[in-house]
């Protein structure tokens, strides 16, 4: 079987009125060979493996505005009752096409030649029904909802499949018979890299017939049998309608089943009573990244960018590829000359000759690129792999493609705001003082409320409240998200407002409500804000948990602080914030009394968040009330956890409200204090940064003396807390503290600390060096 494909003669599969062409779902050689076979055969009807519901929109493939990669999308037009579909309830599937997909070339040929173009697979209305529990669904549907076809791809395994898995990986079996341990390399050699010679389709059909004879039927094949029965039924219908020359384009595995003489009554029984659901069809843009097998697509290929290149440049593909790689590297300021390209071509061709390949494949080209163009460096090879081997690109569909109103409204907004979707990550800096950038920000925030994360906020490089930075990446599944979100409204603004009101009514906690309120302000949803604010005020008035109030406050303060920048009215929000601040300050002392370690650590986060929020709000009356509440806490340290006492002491020190901090620290780390409480106090005090130890020598000596005086067992217990505290500092802070320790030397000897004369310097040197390295001073 090793030489089976090259030796078989060309010609059509049968001499009758029907020709069946078995293809791999995405392959440049298959696409080129199929186009030539169709031109030679000249069919008046072309039947293609795919959902028949798409027959009414297949003519859109001939529109100049249709630019692959694109996909047919079948979806359930009605989500669950009560609103848009949740992710777990989604009913949708994709059938992707690239320029190098044989099915796409068959569609384009049929439309250009005036032939009838139809789809012949099992209807999507039946394929979207969940498979029966007694058997697996062999339709090839990928985990991301992509359509059938994965069983022929051969990309799932590097070698051959065991006999019982022949149906799942027929190409792996053929590759093993041919002496290959890589199914994709074998398929590339015998099909994709062949530019001339006889048609491969008769040999493919014969090979698949041989394999299918070795597969025993099983209950898991039921969906496969239904699909093939529907394909045969579609062929019979086409012949009955009077078509004289019918071409069927399907996955290679199905060819023997379509050639078999199966009575129509048998297929009718197979298809009788199949459950179905209501579906709608449309075209959506797709990406090369989603055609890659690593995305989880069952019929995916390893290198869509390479395959696109092989299809678009059939003459001298290796030379053109390496020249393009050199151009890419030069754009990244890497020195690559024409001599590099010439040597890389020679090396790739030599490797192909040594390995007996008809054309240098991607492996040989990559090895030549690494050795010559990149001079052994791996980073430039990864750049070429991302930019060229995958070759990420986003397709386009014409304006007259069926869409839900929400999709059309988003497209209009994208054009108005000049935000073009792209499959490549693009960073967008927005200046909210500019009207266009402000509208862009509002649109991106609204889409995030609809779970369409086209833009993801990033940390802005510029300081100030007028700047936002977003990372924009368009993914094909966003079209499904928009279709589901259309249950909320026909425009992005209306749908987002309705969704926000529903989220507010369904929020179970006060922080959830404050998050919705903040997002409404960012998205400028004035219509939804009154409803959200009423729910927020009602919940805040009834919630007596101080931790909940403290968790809710920062989001509200952010919304209040930045509302003026966006021109959004925040009057009702100010009333809620004022009430929350008063209730937090009043309820704080009893709320923090008698906390255990875990609860104290959780509350520490709330204290820091509220402190930062009130500093951002810059309301002096609220700040004074908060500082008074903190002062009252440390007035009764016996009821306060050490972690919180230390942190509150630091906050009041930074605010200039305490002048006896050394005395407080001395008491906290005195001999009479439990080591665990002392360590918690120090951790809380130093968690705000280590500069206080750099600028206050007295505090540094107190911490140093306390650590040095700890008994061995106590030191072992508190060491993790100290490492966590100092490990959070920046390297510059640790170096500065280490330098101060080195200059200050050992603290004066005391009753709990030996004098310098009692120390063995030689034995202590390793410990001193280790301590200095932990503090960031000394050799790295």
Image (cartoon, rainbow, N blue to C red):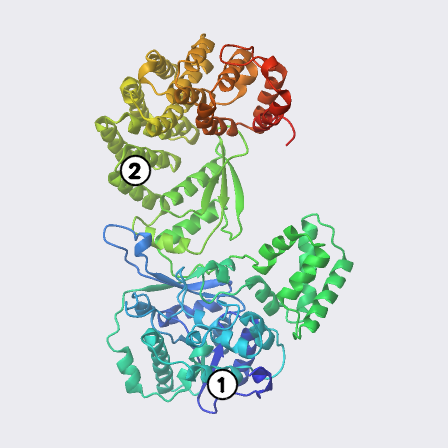
Between circles 1 and 2, the one closer to the viewer is 1
In the rendered image, the quadrant that contains the C terminus is top right
In the rendered image, the quadrant that contains the N terminus is bottom right
Q: CA distance from mark 1 to mark 2?
A: 64 Å
Which residue carries the number 1 mark? Answer: 206
SS type, badge 1: helix
Which residue carries the number 2 mark? Answer: 528
Q: Is residue 687 above or below residue 418?
A: above
Q: Earlier in the sequence, mark 1 or mark 2?
A: 1
Picture coordinates of residue 367, whole percent (x, y)? 67, 61
Picture coordinates of residue 170, whole percent (x, y)? 47, 76
Q: How busy is the neighbourhood of tag 1: few (under 14 within 10 Å), some, or many (20 plus)?
A: some
Residue positioned most to the bottom? 15
The residue that appears at 73% across and 62% down in the rendered structure is 344
The residue that appears at 49% across and 30% down in the rendered structure is 466
SS type, badge 2: loop
């Amino acid at each position: 079987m090793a030489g089976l494909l090259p030796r078989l003669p060309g010609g059509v599969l049968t001499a009758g009125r029907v020709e069946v062409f078995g293809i791999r779902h995405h392959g440049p050689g298959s696409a080129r060979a199929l186009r030539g076979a169709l031109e030679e055969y000249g069919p008046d009807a072309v039947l293609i493996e795919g959902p028949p519901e798409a027959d009414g929109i297949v003519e859109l493939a001939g529109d100049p505005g249709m630019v692959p990669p694109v996909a047919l999308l079948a979806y359930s037009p009605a989500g669950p009752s009560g609103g848009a579909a949740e992710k777990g309830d989604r009913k949708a599937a994709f059938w992707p096409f690239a320029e190098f997909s044989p099915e796409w070339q068959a569609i384009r040929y049929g439309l250009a030649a005036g032939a009838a173009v139809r789809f012949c697979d099992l209807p999507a209305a039946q394929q979207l029904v969940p498979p029966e529990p007694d058997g697996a669904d062999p339709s090839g549907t990928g985990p991301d909802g992509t359509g059938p076809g994965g069983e022929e791809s051969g990309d799932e395994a590097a070698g051959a499949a065991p006999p019982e898995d022949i149906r799942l990986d027929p190409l792996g079996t053929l590759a093993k018979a041919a002496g290959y341990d890589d199914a994709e390399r074998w398929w590339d050699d015998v099909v994709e890299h062949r530019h001339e010679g006889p048609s491969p389709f008769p040999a493919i059909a014969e090979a698949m017939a041989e394999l299918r004879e070795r597969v025993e039927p099983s209950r898991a094949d039921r969906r496969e049998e239904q699909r093939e029965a529907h394909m045969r039924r579609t062929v019979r219908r086409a012949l009955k309608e009077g078509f004289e020359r019918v071409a069927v384009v399907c996955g290679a595995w199905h060819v023997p089943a379509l050639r078999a003489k199966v009575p129509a009554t048998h297929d009718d029984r197979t298809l009788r009573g199949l459950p179905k659901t209501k579906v709608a069809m449309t075209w959506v843009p797709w990406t090369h990244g989603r055609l890659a097998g690593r995305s989880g697509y069952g019929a995916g290929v390893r290198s869509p960018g390479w395959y696109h290149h092989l299809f678009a440049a059939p003459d001298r593909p290796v030379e053109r590829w390496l020249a393009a790689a050199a151009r890419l590297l030069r754009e990244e300021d890497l020195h690559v000359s024409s001599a590099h390209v010439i040597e890389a071509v020679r090396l790739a061709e030599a490797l192909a000759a040594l390995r007996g390949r008809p054309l240098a494949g991607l492996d040989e080209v990559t090895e030549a690129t690494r050795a010559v163009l990149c001079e052994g460096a791996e980073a430039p090879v990864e750049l070429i792999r991302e930019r060229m081997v995958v070759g990420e690109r986003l397709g386009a569909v014409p304006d007259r493609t069926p869409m839900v109103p929400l999709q059309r409204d988003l497209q209009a907004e994208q054009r108005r705001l000049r935000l073009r979707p792209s499959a490549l990550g693009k960073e967008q800096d927005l200046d909210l003082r500019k009207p266009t950038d402000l509208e862009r920000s509002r649109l991106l925030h609204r889409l995030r409320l609809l779970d369409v994360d086209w833009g993801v906020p990033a940390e802005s490089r510029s300081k100030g409240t007028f700047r936002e930075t977003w990372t924009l990446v368009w993914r094909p599944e966003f079209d499904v998200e928009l279709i589901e979100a259309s249950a909320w409204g026909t425009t992005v603004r209306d749908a987002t407002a309705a969704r926000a009101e529903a989220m507010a009514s369904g929020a179970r906690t006060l922080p959830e409500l404050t998050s919705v309120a903040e997002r409404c302000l960012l998205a400028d949803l004035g219509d939804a804000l009154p409803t959200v604010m009423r729910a927020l005020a009602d919940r805040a008035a009834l919630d007596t948990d101080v931790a909940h109030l403290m968790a809710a406050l920062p989001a509200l303060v952010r919304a209040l602080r930045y509302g003026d920048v966006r021109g959004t009215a925040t009057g009702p929000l100010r009333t809620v914030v004022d009430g929350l601040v008063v209730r937090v300050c009043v309820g704080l002392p009893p709320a923090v009394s008698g906390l255990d370690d875990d609860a104290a650590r959780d509350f520490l986060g709330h204290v820091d968040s509220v402190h930062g929020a009130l500093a951002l709000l810059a309301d002096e009356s609220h700040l004074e009330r908060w500082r008074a509440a903190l002062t009252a806490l440390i007035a009764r340290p016996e009821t306060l956890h050490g972690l919180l006492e230390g942190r509150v002491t630091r906050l009041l020190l930074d605010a200039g409200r305490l002048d006896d901090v050394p005395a407080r620290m001395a008491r906290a780390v005195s001999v009479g204090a439990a080591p665990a409480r002392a360590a918690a106090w120090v951790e809380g005090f130093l968690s705000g940064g280590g500069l206080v130890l750099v600028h206050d020598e007295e505090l540094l000596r107190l911490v140093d003396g306390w650590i040095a005086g700890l008994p061995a067992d106590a030191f072992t217990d508190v060491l993790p807390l100290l490492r966590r505290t100092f490990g959070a500092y920046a390297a510059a802070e640790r170096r500065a503290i280490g330098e101060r320790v080195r200059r200050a030397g050992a603290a004066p000897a005391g009753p709990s600390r030996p004098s310098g004369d009692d120390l063995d310097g030689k034995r202590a040197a390793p410990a001193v060096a280790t301590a200095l390295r932990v503090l960031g001073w000394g050799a790295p």
